[in-house]
Amino acid sequence: MLPSIILLLVLFIIMLVLIGKGTIERAAIVLICALVAFFIIITLEKAPPDVVVGFLFGTVTNNFTNFHTLLLIFGMMVISTICQQTGLFQFIASKMIQVTRGDPKKLVIFIGLFTYGVSAILEDSITAIILIPITIIVCKSLALKPAPYVIMQALFIKLGATVLPISSVPSIMITTDQGITFFEYLATAGLVSFSIAIFTILIFLMLFRQKSPKDHLLVSPSTTDLDTLHVPKDRKMMYVSLGTFIAIIFGFIFIPPAILSSDAIAFTGAMFLVLCNIRKAEVIFKAIDFNFLLYLLGIFIITGCLDYVGVINLIAQGLTFLGITDLGFAFLALLWIGAVASAFVDNIPITQLFLPLINVLMGAKGTSTAKIGSMGLSLGVIWGDNFTPFGDSILALAVAKSNDVTIQPKDFFKYGFPITLLQLGVISLVVLLLFDAIIGLIVCGIAGIILCVIFHYHIRKKRRQIE
């Protein structure tokens, strides 16, 4: 057993490093590693070959959770692709930009909330690819520096990815595996996400207020680039897509899972939109990233092999040895372990690896404590991307560079690390106050002193600059 654990962990780390470098297609990397992992447990652990079916699609015991996850992701990919092709989000963005009239403060609020809302609907990478070029066009037309706004947008993409259980792949994986309903997720993680989003907008309003007035020239947004965003590519289909998406959301909320599961609702909506666009079906399916689905299948195999040899139990035993058995501390462990891990590598394998850890630390699937733990892992693995520019947030920098805006990793780190640390810190303080008021108050006092010192330092620095 020990040789298998060592070999699989080394293989998992190699896979994460290769994915992080981005020089090879990640689906190819993961599938090769999956084959090697499967060979290891077949030869060293004498596992039956049909165990791979359980890794890929789930088993009767866990209600085939992986299959339901894949179906839900595929359905939402089809829907978001069609919405993108009709020009729905560009059209809404252009109309809302006109409302700001070039006011930088209003622009901060608009970009933050609009990005937050779109990211709640679309997958992270699609949101970045659609919205970041629009933001750059808007900023250039208003004589504003695009880099700070793009960095802010990257942070809000991850915040928006925790609004709904369909907002990101990790949230889909977690809610499907743990049996969390649409409303349960929205009323907990979604509410926390919205509160932190408002808090983050206030932070950026204060940060951007310190900019030089010459960076905030008010110019009427009437450039040719903006005007081209006003006209939807297919107005009729745009309204059909919008109506279908709204109907799907209502279905998630009001249709009991026992009658129709979330993946079935999403798949039905996707097929309806495909039928409405039957003449463009080939174009739609060409735009869908099927390599991503293969990537997920490979991740399911590798993490299944790790779980098979007992890696998750070893992690749980280590946390227990450290005394992390209290529910509040277990929640924080899931939050911070997920955040730190996803700061450097793709959050999907991290999510799949740590899913069983929820039930080891927080109780069986379906229990209220396990659902609370699921929210901690979801917030951690998704928001943790913003700690550094080396996780999934690197895509935002790549999209900006392709649109002639270069953002150095250190510039992203300057905003991303302290703001994400503050976001997770606020949640941690609230959790400590709820589960252990005394420790929570002590930590709040220490945090208050640190913030006062930092604030005093910045005030003195600002006075020196004025003098």
Image (cartoon, grey):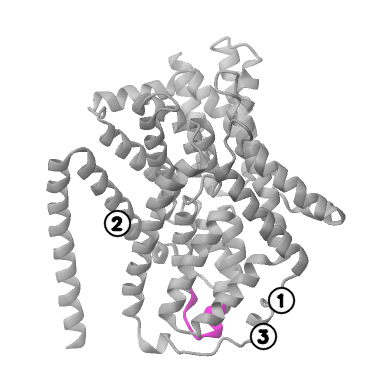
| Nearer mark to the viewer, of 1 and 2 | 1
In x, y percent, where is residue 288?
72, 50
82 or 142: nearer the eye? Answer: 82
* Disc 1 to disc 2, C-alpha distance: 40 Å
* SS for dot 3: helix
Is 143 a magenta residue? yes
Which residue is rendered at x = 56% and y = 28% of the image? 302
417 or 121: nearer the eye? Answer: 121
Relative to residue 82, is residue 58 drawn left or right? left
Q: Which residues lie in the magenta part?
A: 138-146
From where the camera sits, is residue 30 visible? no
How many numbered markers are drawn? 3
Picture layout, residue 257 above or below residue 406: above
Which residue is rendered at x = 55% and y = 78% of the image? 97
Read off the residue under disc 3: 224
Read off the residue under disc 1: 231
* SS for dot 2: helix
Relative to residue 9, is residue 335 drawn left or right? left
Read off the residue under disc 2: 422
In x, y percent, where is residue 134?
59, 72
Q: Earlier in the sequence, mark 2 or mark 3?
A: 3
Q: Amino acid at mark 3?
A: Thr
Which residue is rendered at x = 61% and y = 68% of the image? 402
In x, y percent, where is residue 382?
45, 48
Density class for disc 3 (Cα within 10 Å; few <14, some 14-19, many ≥20) is few
